[in-house]
Amino acid sequence: MIQPNPIRILIVDDHAMVRSGLRMFLLAFDDLELVGEAVNGIEAVKLAEKLNPDVILMDLIMPNMDGLNATHQIHLKLPKIKIIALTSFTEPQLINKAIDAGVSGYLYKDTSANELANAIRAVHSGKTIFSPEVTQKRDNQSSPAGSPFFDLTTREREVLSLMANGKSNIEISEILSLSLSTAKFHVSNILSKLNAHSRGEAVSIALKNHLLD
């Protein structure tokens, strides 16, 4: 049986101990491969262009160029690269800025090894992954929950919540006991109502407007 190619990972963090810990973590999983390390956003952009990794684990607060700017630049130049914000900061404003910059996931550094490995696999497959705490954070400048502008049904809100947790259409259909075509229909309606072009953008809009509260 032919083994699939490992997921190629670029680590970006200005703390040597964090990079060392992530390096050791990656060695424990045969399907994850470390291809490079960067200590700031400037190096991250250069290495992303040079190495073209599948997934980047991106710290957000770094000297010279922070992770937000690096994520934005990489997303513009190399949109196929998936970026997971891996940080200790919980501020809602930072979370929203990271999502706007194009991250496909937002996890805290106390995430367990297995949770991080599963998040990398999920993001690589096209899903979005956010720590449960992220969906509870509020941005005081955002619209109130349940804004009539979006006009989502109760079922669509349930589907949207599962989308935010990285669930695929098949998983959504199984969890909510829906046919696959019905699950796809709800996802399509959500994207249309939120004027989003992708699942990740829909989740970003939902988080900023407290539709998941």
Image: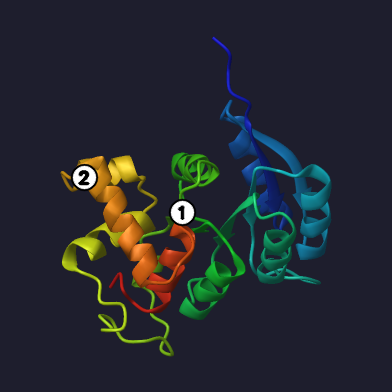
Residue occupied by mark 2: 175
Q: Disc 2 or 1, which lies upstream in sequence?
A: 1
Residue at the spot x=28%, y=73% of the render?
Answer: 213
Residue at the spot x=36%, y=87% of the render?
Answer: 143
As drawn, the residue found furthest toward the bottom would be: 141
Question: In the image, residue 187 lies at what x, y percent?
Answer: 33, 56
Question: In the image, residue 176 lies at what x, y percent?
Answer: 18, 48
Residue at the spot x=81%, y=72% of the render?
Answer: 64
Question: In the image, residue 17 lies at what x, y percent?
Answer: 68, 52
Kindly state the secondary structure of the residue where label 2 is placed: helix
As drawn, the residue found furthest toward the top would be: 1
Up-down: is 210 above or below 159? below
Q: CA distance from mark 2 to mark 1?
A: 17 Å
Question: In the image, residue 184 lies at what x, y percent?
Answer: 31, 49
Question: Tag 1: Cα neighbours inside 10 Å, few (<14), some, or many (≥20)?
Answer: many
| Horizontal arrangement in the rendering, residue 207 relative to residue 148 (left or right) | right
| Horizontal arrangement in the rendering, residue 76 relative to residue 190 (left or right) | right
Up-down: is 50 above or below 75? above
Residue occupied by mark 1: 128
Residue 74: quadrant of the picture: bottom right
Residue at the spot x=36%, y=45% of the render?
Answer: 168
Question: Tag 2: Cα neighbours inside 10 Å, few (<14), some, or many (≥20)?
Answer: few
- Give amino acid for label 2: Ile
